Image (cartoon, grey):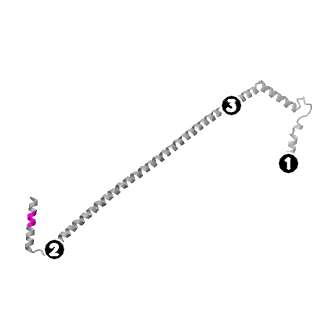
Amino acid sequence: MKKLTAVFVLAASPAFAATGPFFSLHNTDFIVTLAFLLFVGVLFYYKVPAMLGGMLDKRAAGIKADLEEARSLREEAQEMLATYERKSREVQDTADLIVATARRDAMAAADAAKAELKVSIARRLKAAEEQIASAEAAAVRDVKHQAVSVAVAAAGELLAAQLSADAKAKLIDASIGEVATRLN
């Protein structure tokens, strides 16, 4: 099989195709050359190279237009990028200003709350001191009343033990008389 393939390859080689003088119709090289020249002549007759040149010029113009459009789009994108970067810086500056203002306001609110808390504590302390003073006065008054009640009861018991029934009746009459005069 390999030998057969080698025979066909050698038999089909161009060296065996051309026989005789070059300018003869029996020479295949001459025929191929004439066909090629005729083909090139037909191409020039129908202005194929001009059409190909025109097509290439159109393609080059299209590519140039695409490049110009891409360049203008790139410039527009760069302008948009610069605009967005500028806006981003402005927004960042505004955000920084808002944060600084918020911190100042928070500090002021904290200071105001501290001051209000101090005033509230002072008020509550004063109210507590007043309540303590009032409770002390009430306790002193209650102790005095209790002491007076105990003293009166002790005096009453002492008098009751030392006074006779006549003396008690005289004291009761005198007291009733004194109350009557004070009420009138």
Report the residue marked by disc 3. 64
| Tag of residue 118 | none
- At horizontal 42% and vertical 52% (from top left) the residue drawn is 114
Real-space Cα separation, disc 3 to disc 2, in angstroms = 135 Å
Q: Could you tell me residue 35's position as x and y percent?
A: 83, 29
Above/below status of 145 relative to 5: below
Secondary element under disc 1, as helix, strand or loop, is helix
Label 3: few (<14), some (14–19) or many (≥20) C-alpha neighbours in 10 Å = few
Q: Write down the quadrant of residue 121 in the picture.
A: bottom left
Q: Could you tell me residue 20's position as x and y percent?
A: 92, 32
- At horizontal 65% and vertical 33% (from top left) the residue drawn is 71
Secondary element under disc 2, as helix, strand or loop, is helix
Q: Could you tell me residue 82's position as x and y percent?
A: 59, 37
Q: Residue furthest right?
A: 20
| Nearer the camera: disc 1 or disc 2 | 2
Real-space Cα separation, disc 1 to disc 2, in angstroms = 161 Å
Badge 2 amino acid = Leu
Q: Nearer the viewer, residue 172 or 105?
A: 172
Q: Could you tell me residue 74's position as x and y percent?
A: 63, 35
Q: Name which of mark 1 and mark 2 comes first in the sequence.
A: 1
Q: Name which of mark 3 and mark 2 comes first in the sequence.
A: 3
Report the residue marked by disc 2. 158
Badge 3 amino acid = Lys
Q: Are marks 1 and 3 in contact (CB under 8 Å)?
A: no
Q: Nearer the viewer, residue 57 or 106?
A: 106
Q: Name which of mark 1 and mark 3 comes first in the sequence.
A: 1
| Tag of residue 2 | 1
Query: Which contiguous range is marked in magenta?
Result: 174-178
| Nearer the camera: disc 1 or disc 3 | 3
- At horizontal 17% and vertical 70% (from top left) the residue drawn is 153
Label 2: few (<14), some (14–19) or many (≥20) C-alpha neighbours in 10 Å = few
